[in-house]
Amino acid sequence: MESSTDALTAHRDRAQQDYAELVTRRLSLDLTRGKPAANQLDLSAPLLALPGDTYKAAEGLDTRNYGGLHGLRELREIFSGPLQVPVEQLVAAGNSSLELMHDSLVHALLSVLPGATSRWVDEERIAFLCPVPGYDRHFGVCERLGIEMIPVPMTDEGPDMETVERLVAEDASVKGVWCVPKYSNPDGISYSDETVTRLAAMPTAAPDFRIFWDNAYAVHHLTDERVEIADLLAACADHGNPDRAFVFGSTSKITFAGSGVGFFGASPANVTWLLGNMAKRTIGPDKINQLRHALFLKDEAGVYAHMDLHRAELRPKFDAVLRILEAELGGTGLATWTDPKGGYFITLKVLDGCAREVVRRAAEAGIVLTPAGATHPHGQDPDDAVIRIAPSFPAPDELEKAIAGVTACVRLVGYEKLLAAK
Amino acid sequence: MESSTDALTAHRDRAQQDYAELVTRRLSLDLTRGKPAANQLDLSAPLLALPGDTYKAAEGLDTRNYGGLHGLRELREIFSGPLQVPVEQLVAAGNSSLELMHDSLVHALLSVLPGATSRWVDEERIAFLCPVPGYDRHFGVCERLGIEMIPVPMTDEGPDMETVERLVAEDASVKGVWCVPKYSNPDGISYSDETVTRLAAMPTAAPDFRIFWDNAYAVHHLTDERVEIADLLAACADHGNPDRAFVFGSTSKITFAGSGVGFFGASPANVTWLLGNMAKRTIGPDKINQLRHALFLKDEAGVYAHMDLHRAELRPKFDAVLRILEAELGGTGLATWTDPKGGYFITLKVLDGCAREVVRRAAEAGIVLTPAGATHPHGQDPDDAVIRIAPSFPAPDELEKAIAGVTACVRLVGYEKLLAAK
C-alpha cells in the first residue's frame, strides 16, 4: 500500500496520541507464555482429590511404590491414539514433555543411540534443523547443550522440504530436526501428508538422524475441523527408517500445566534405549499422578470431550484477538496475522525491522510480549518481523486491552518506519 | 575359630539337610530392594485425596499452572532443618533424588560448574571416589555417564579419610565423592563430625570438586537415638569451600516411594547454576504434589512424628532378622552383620569368597537377594563377602522364612569352604 507523506503523518500522529493515552493507563498485562487460564485449570478440578481411596492400577500394581518405569499402561492406552504411538512403544513419564526432549538429547550426547557409531558428544559437531518461526524452548535446549541450530523456513505445509532434504543429505553432522507438526508454535501450521512422508523417507547422511516430533497440540483444536496429521512413526517404519522418529506429547495443556504427564513414543529399539538410560536416572515415574489422570480422563473419548471444554474457553479469546487486529490493523498494510485452527498462539507479522520496537513500546506501556526474535534460534529473527501472541492466560477484558494496546504500538512503529523511508 | 574336620563335616551335613529341605519348600521371596512395605505406604493414605479442594500455595501461587522452578517454599521450609540446608538454598523438584544426582552430573558434564574451567565432558578423565560398600545406583549413574570409579574403604566413621585426602590432593581428575552420611547404604554407618570436617576442609587438586551428599536417611531412625551428623554445607562454607557440597534428599521413604519429592541443596552459586540448567529442561516441578506433601506433613515436627510410625513398622522386621541371624549363625564364625541405628539395610558379611555362592544358592531356593557385589563399583566386591539384606518390603512371616533360608545357605557355603581349605 502506497500512502502520501501527509496521510502517513496523520496516521502516525493519531498513533502517537493513542500510544500516549495507552501509557497513561498504566497497564500491567502479560501476553508472553502459552499458559492455560485459571478457568481452564478449573476444568480438571476433580484431579485435586484423585485417586481418593484407591492406589491400585488395572494391572494390580501398587502405584505408591517404586518401579513401573514404562509408565501406567491404562494411561498409555488413552494417549496411544491421539499421539499415534502403539501402547507398547509409548512411555508415560514425569510432568513435562520438554524434559523428555531435553533428556533424549542428553542421552544421545552421552550414550550411543540406536544406529549411531558414537556418542554425539564425541563427534566434532552436532547440528539440528530448526524450522522458523519455532518454539523458543527447543532452541534453548540446543543452545544449552552445545547443539548448533540451522534455521529452515516454514511453509504452509511444514518446513521447506527441499531445504531439509538437501541439508540432511549432504551433512552427517545434521542429527535432527525439531517439528511441532500440528497447530505449530507459533504459526498454527499443520504438516501436510506429503511433508510427513518426505521426512520419513528422505535419505540422511547421519545414520542416527532423529525427528523430534513435538506433538504438543495433538488434541488442541479451535474449530470443528479436528485436523489430522499423518502417522510419522508408521511412515518412518514403512520407509525403512523405523528408528528415525521421537514422538513427544503431554497433558500439560489438557489437565494441569505443572502437574500433567509427559509421553515419549518411538520404535521398540529407541524405547529400549530410552528406558535403559532412564533406569539409571529414576526408579520410576509418579504413577499415582498417572493413575489420577487415567481415572479422570477415562478413555480417548474422554480426552476429546475434555478438549471441547478447553476450546469453549479459548475460542472467544482467539476471536477477540482476531477481531481487534482486523479492526485496528486491517487494511493498513502494517501487519498480517494467522487464524489458527488449533494450538495456543497467533503470529503477528509486522513490517520488517519493526518487531523489537513494537515489543519495546508495548513493554513501556505495561504490556509484556514474548521477546521479538524468541521464535528464532538465539533470539535472532533476521527480518525482525515476528511477534508471538499468547491469548490463553489473561482474562478476556485484559486480553482485549492488551491487544488493543499492541495494535497502537504496531501503528506507531509502523507509520514511523514508513515515514522514515520516505 | 578352629574346628576339626569331623566337626566341620557334621556341620556341613546338617547344613546340606537344611538346604535340601529349604529347596523343597519352593519359596518365592524377594529381599532385593529397600522398598517400603504396603503397611508403610498406608501411613500416607491421606495424600491420595490431597490437596482436595485447594490449589493455592501459601504465597498465593496457583500450583496447577507452569512455573515455580525452585519448588514450593512451604515444603522447603519443612525439610530445611532435616536436610541442614537454608530454605533459600534448597530446591524441591520431582519424584526422586536419584534423578537430581544424575542430572547434577549431566549438567556438570555438559555445562560449566561454578569453580570449573571447562565442561567435564571436555576433560580427559573424570573420576569419583566411591566408599565401599556403597549404593549400587550411585555406581550405575557413574558407569552410564563414563565416570571412572575409585573404591575407598569405609570405616565406622565414614570413608577412610586418609585415603580420600590423598586421592583428592594428588589428582585433579578426581571430581567428586559419593556419600550416604547417615545410616549409610548398606552398612548403617553415620559419619563422625571429624569426617565431615575433613571432607569440608581437605585441599583438592580439582577446583570444581563436589561432595555428593546423599542424605537419603536423614530422618529414618530405628532407635531412640536420633543420630545427628554435622552440617556439611556450613562446614564447607566455614572452611572456604562453599561450593563443594551438593546435598540430596527425598520423601521417597517418608511418604510414597514413587510419588514423593526430591530435594537439592547447595551454595547460592550452585543453586543458581542448577536452576539455570533445570530451566532449560522444565518449566517447573509438580507443585501440586509439593503442596500435597506440605499439607500432609505440616511441619518439621510432623515429619518426625510420621517417621516414628515408620519405625514402629520397621523395627520388628529388623529385630526379627537380627534374632534369626544370631540364632542360626551366632558363634559359627561364618558371618558378621550390622545392627544399624537407622536406614533400610543390614549388611551380612560372610567368609571371603562366599557371597556370590550364598546368593546363588538362595536364588535356587527361591529367595532373591541383591546380587553379591552390587555394593561395589561395577558389581565387583574384591572379597566377595558382602550381602545386603533389605528387610522392609516382605511381610513379617515371609521375611523370617527368607532370612532363615539365607542362614542355611550361609552355613552350607561356609562349611563347604572351610572343609575345602582343610
Image: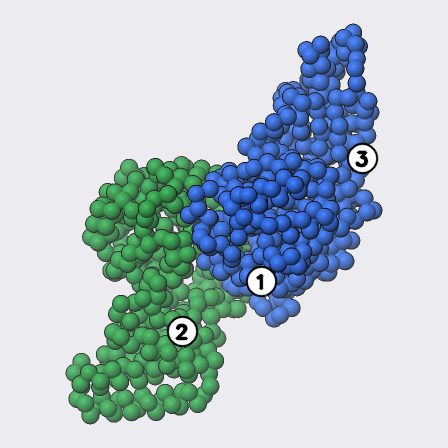
Chain colours: A blue, B green
**Element class at badge 3:** helix
Residue on which the image places disc 1: A268
Q: Quadrant of the N terminus of chain B?
A: bottom left
Above or below residue A227? Residue A92 is below
User: Which residue occupies 74% across, 18% down?
Assistant: A411
Any part of residue B252 in sight: no
State whether discs 2 and 1 lie on one chain: no
User: Does residue A131 sit above or below A273 in this rendering?
Assistant: above
Kind of residue sitting beneath label 1: Pro
Is residue A214 in view? yes
Q: Secondary structure at mark 2?
A: loop
Rendered location of residue B179, percent (x, y): 33, 54
The residues bearing labels 3 and 1 have C-alpha atoms spaced at a distance of: 43 Å
Circle nearer the viewer, 2 or 3 = 3
The residue under label 2 is which amino acid type?
A: Leu
Give the amino acid at mark 3.
Asp
- Report which residue position mark 3 lands on: A319
